[in-house]
Amino acid sequence: MIFFLILIFRKDFFVFGNQNHESDSVIKKEFPVITVEGKKNNIDNVLKYTNSSIISHQEIKDMNPSNLGEVIGYQPGIYIRDYGGLGGLKSISLRGTNSMQTLITFEGMRLNSSQTSMLDLNIVPISIIEQIQVFKGGSSSISGSNSIAGIVNLETKNFIRNNELFLNFDYGSFNEVNISGNISFAGSSQFVGHLDYQHSDGNFPFYSNQFGEVKEFTRENGKYDRFSVYLYRPMVTKSFSAKPFILFSLIKRGSPGAVLQGHIESLDARLNENNIIFSIPTTTTISKTSLLKSNISFKFYKTEYYNPEYSFLVDENKINFSNDEIQFASIYSNNFLNDLNVSIGIDFIASELRGNMLDKDANDKVKRYNIAAFSNIDYEWFSSGTLMISSNLGLRADAVSKLFPNYSYSFGTSANFLNSDLILKVLFSNNFRIPSFNEMYYLNYGNTNLKTEKSTNLNLGLFLKFNENLNFELNGYIIKTYDQIVSIPISPLRWSAKNIAETLSRGFEFSSNFDLFDDLLNIKINYTLQKVSDETPESYTKGKIIVYTPQELINSTILIKTQLANSLLQLFYSSHRFFLPENDYSSYLPSYFLVNFSLYKDLRLLDQNFRFRIDFENIFNRRYEIIKNYPMPGFSFKVGFGSNLSLWED
C-alpha cells in the first residue's frame, strides 16, 4: 500500500506528469483548467432543485474558524451539536435530523463512518478546505444512504496557479495553538503539501450545581492534539484529469465525559484516533457532450478509548475499533442538444469493522457490501426570452448485505423567470439510511434484525435577486421518517437499538445577503423556524419535540472593510431545547445568544501578502450547554498571523 501511494505522488508516474502546458500569462505560470461545454455534474442536476449554498474560501478566511462546525453552523437550517471545548465531539444536525442522516463528503468521497453512520467534524482540518457546498433536501437517489436531510461536500483547490508558501499561526485562550503550513508548486509538476497542528489544554472554567450549591470548576481532562498531513497531486491533459490525494490525521484527546452529581469528570479517560483517507477522482472527456467521472477511495479509521472506569468490561481498560472501507463510483453523463442530460452510474462500497466490543457472535469482525445502480435525467423542456423551466428525475437501487434492497427516487422542477431574477423550485424525494455497524453489532446493544430507515421529503424554494447587491432565499420543507432507529431500555441495565420511531420535521428557512457601499459592508442574515416531533403511533411522547432540537435559529455575519482594518461581527441565537423525550420542565435547556468579534488587517510588504488578526469569541461570557451536562467554554480569544508568500516562477 505504501509503495502504491509513493508511485501515485511521483511526478512521472503518469505519462502526462511531465507534459508542458501553455501559460495564460507571461508573468505567472498558470495551469489549465478543464471545462466541458454544456455538461453538468450529476449531483448538480438534482440539487439545483433544492436549497443549496456555497461557503467560499474568502468567507472561511474571514471567519478564521478552529473547526468545520464554526463555519457550517452559520448556514440556515444547520445546528452543530457540540460536546464542549476544542476536542469535544462535533456533529451536524440538518433540518432537525440527527447526524447520521446527513452525508458528509470530501471531494465527493463519503466520509461518514460505517461504524457510527456519522462524522466527527474534528477529523478534517479546516485549513485545507477551499470551499464548502451545502445541499439541503433528500439526496439518496444520487448519493445513497445517510443523505435523508442533505449533503455537505468539502472541497480543496481544483488547480494551482502559482508557486506559493502559506503559513498561519494562532494562539489563544486555554493554550489553544493552531499552526498550518501549505506549499504549492504550479506548472507541469503541480503538487500541494499541507501540514496542520492543533492543540488545546481545554481547561476552561464552568459552573455546576453540586447538591444544591453552584460552584465554579475547571475542565481538567479536555486536552486535545491533532496532527494532519494532506498531499495532493493534480494531473491534467486535454481530455483527462486526475486528482489523487491523501489525508492523514492523528488525534489524541481527553474524554472528560458528563458533569454529574458527585462526579465532575473522568480524569484518566482518553480517546486516540488514526485516520487515513485516500482517493483518486478522475474525469474523462469522451466528446463535447459526454463525460465520465470515476472515483476509487480508501478509508481507514482506527479508534482506541481508554478508561479505567471500564475495567469490568474489557481487558486493559481499552476499547479498540478499526473501520476500513473501499469505495468505487463511476458516472457517465451525456448532454443531448443542450436541453437533455442523461446520467447513469454505479456505486460499490465494501466495509469492515474489527473491535473488542462487538457482539460475541461476530467474532470481533463484521463486513458489509453495498452495490448500487442509478440514473438521472435532467430536461429543459421550456425556454423563452423570459422563462426557463426544467425538470429532473432520479432513480437508484441499492443492494446491501443482510438487508432488504433499497429503492430511492427524486423528482424536481425549477422555473427561472429571467427578467426578474426569480427562481421557483420544488423537489420531492424518497430516501433511506442503512443501520450502522454499532446499531447492529455493538455488544449488549446491537440488533441484527434492524430495518433500513426510510423517509419522504418535500422541499419548496424561492430565490429572488433584486440586484447585484441584494438577494434572498426562502425554503419550506417536510421530512417524514419511518422506522427510525432509536435506543430503548430492554432491562434495568441494558438498552438496545430498535426500529420503532416515526418523526416529522417541518420548517421554513430564510437567508439574505446584502452588499453595500461598493462591497465595503456585507450583511448576511439567516433565520430558521422548525418543528421536529415524534409521530410514532401509540407512543406516550407522540407530538413531543425531538431531544436537542431548537425550534428557532437566527444567525448573522456583518463584515466591514476599511483602509485601517477589517472587522467581522458574528451573532448566533438558539431557542430552548429539551434533553428528554417527555419535554417536561426538568429537561429544559434554555436559549442562548452568542456574539463573536474579529479584527484583522491585510498588508502587502515586499510583494508578499500578510495578515494580522485578533478574534474574540463569546464576548459576553455566556455560560451554556448544547448537550446536557457538557458545558461550553465562556469568553475566549486568539491572536493570529498569516503569510502567503509567492515563490519562484516557472
Image: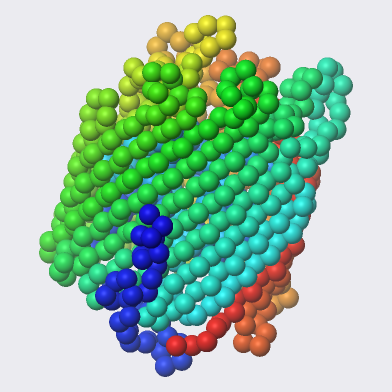
> Within the image, what quadrant is residue 315 found in?
top right
The single residue placed furthest to the bottom in the displayed view is 26
Whether 372 is drawn above or below 247: the answer is: above
Asked whether residue 214 is in view, the answer is yes
Residue at the image point whose x is 72% and y is 40% from the top: 222
Q: Position of residue 127 (x, y in %)?
A: 56, 60
The single residue placed furthest to the left in the displayed view is 337
Residue at the image point whose x is 41% and y is 47% from the top: 299
Q: Position of residue 559 (x, y in %)?
A: 63, 63
User: Observer-nearest residue: 248 or 2?
Assistant: 2
Whether 511 is drawn above or below 351: the answer is: below
Q: Position of residue 529 (x, y in %)?
A: 52, 36
How many marks on residues? 0
Residue at the image point whose x is 26% and y is 31% from the top: 400
Residue at the image point whose x is 23% and y is 52% from the top: 330
Position of 327 with respect to 371 (left or right) is right
The way the protein has been coloured in the rendering is: rainbow
Q: Position of residue 5 (x, y in %)?
A: 39, 60
Quarter of the picture holding the C terminus: bottom left
Quarter of the picture holding the N terminus: bottom left
Asked whether residue 575 is in view, the answer is no
User: Observer-nearest residue: 73 or 435?
Assistant: 435
